[in-house]
Amino acid sequence: MHHINLCMHLRLRSVLRWVLLLWGFLLCQSYAQDTEQLTEQYTEQGKAQIRASLIQHLQVLSSAEFAGRQPGTIGHQKAQQYLSQHLHATHINGQHINQTFQYKFRGKSKQGVNIIYAQKGEMYPNQSIVITAHYDHLGEKNGHIFYGADDNASGTAMLLQIKRWLETQTLAYSVYLVALDAEEDDLNGAKAFLKQFPAQNETLKININLDMLAYGHRQKYMYVVGLNRNPELKGIIDQLNKQSSLKFKPKYFIKADKHSVTSQRINLHKASDHYAFHKQGIPYLFITGENHKNYHSPNDTFARVDQNFYANVFWSLITLIQIVDSSLN
């Protein structure tokens, strides 16, 4: 009798295990299938409203009022206030965090603020996708404002629009949206984030870093960095390129110019905040564009951005997020 009950118990456990695995598989498949009809979910009016909101964020963040967003300046503080306002949590599973930290750069003590929106996942609340974009820039020099429209108001504005989309979604994994400070100061914002996060019993699965999204490669396609370091991510980009009209092409080095911080070619692996995640063993996808003539100059302005190209990047990025969410192990 005990032997029969034991057999029945084992069979029931086996059946239950397979039911749970099948449910998880079908749920992930439903997320993946949704990406194929992503833009079709919106009316033309809805698409126009999303585009207008995205462009407005870019225009505000790269305006003279924010004066180049250099840490320690009034313009930088105004950027923090703007980002806090728009990353404020309204989703039932959302949370807004301002992370203040101290750091030293070139012999000076400074204070930075990372502005964070976190949203819990449906299936894996303790495993997270981290999407980052730095909001600091170079400020003013010799009476000229370095507006930083592409570098990196473009990534930060994209983060704000992704947040509005994310609040309408139910993803399998939790998501952090992090407006990072002090990228121009030796990636200190990313380093500070990683000192506090992940929380106990939480795993950061991947970093998607957004930096300089407004130009791509001559407004034709975007660069994606990280596939050589994490070849398991290649399938994600292959799937994205099948679903997106805007293509993402692997890139590892770009040429330096007179505005670059180095006279050598630029190693994109170390070029932005994703490098801090890599040093912690966290896989990354770095989405970026070319080192154009307006980079790190007062000519990096809102007026020089191709708004149609930039808006198309948004649709590709939310497709990428859904593919990542349905593909992680």
Image (spheres, rainbow, N blue to C red):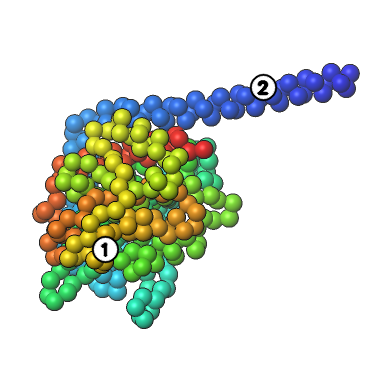
Query: Which residue corresponds to the image point at 17% horizontal and 65% vertical from the top-left?
Result: 258
Q: Are marks 1 and 2 in contact (CB under 8 Å)?
A: no
Choose top left, top right, bottom left or bottom right for residue 149. Answer: bottom left
Left or right position of 64 against 111: left
Q: Nearer the viewer, residue 46 or 177?
A: 177
What residue type is disc 2 on? Val
For the point 28% across and 59% down, the residue is: 266
Q: Against 223, is 96 above or below? A: below
Q: Which mark is residue 15?
A: 2
287, above or below 139, in the image: above
Q: Is residue 5 visible?
A: yes
Let me know if residue 287 appears in the view.
Answer: no
Residue 147: horizontal and vertical position, in percent? 17, 63
Where the N terminus falls, by quadrant? top right
User: Residue 137, percent across and down?
Assistant: 25, 65
**What is the quadrant of residue 17 in the picture?**
top right
Q: Nearer the viewer, residue 249 or 77?
A: 249
Give x and y (percent) for residue 268. 32, 55
Q: CA distance from mark 1 to mark 2?
A: 60 Å
Q: Nearer the viewer, mark 1 or mark 2?
A: 1
Q: Which mark is residue 183?
A: none
Q: Residue at x 58, y 28 (%)?
A: 21
Mark number for residue 264? 1
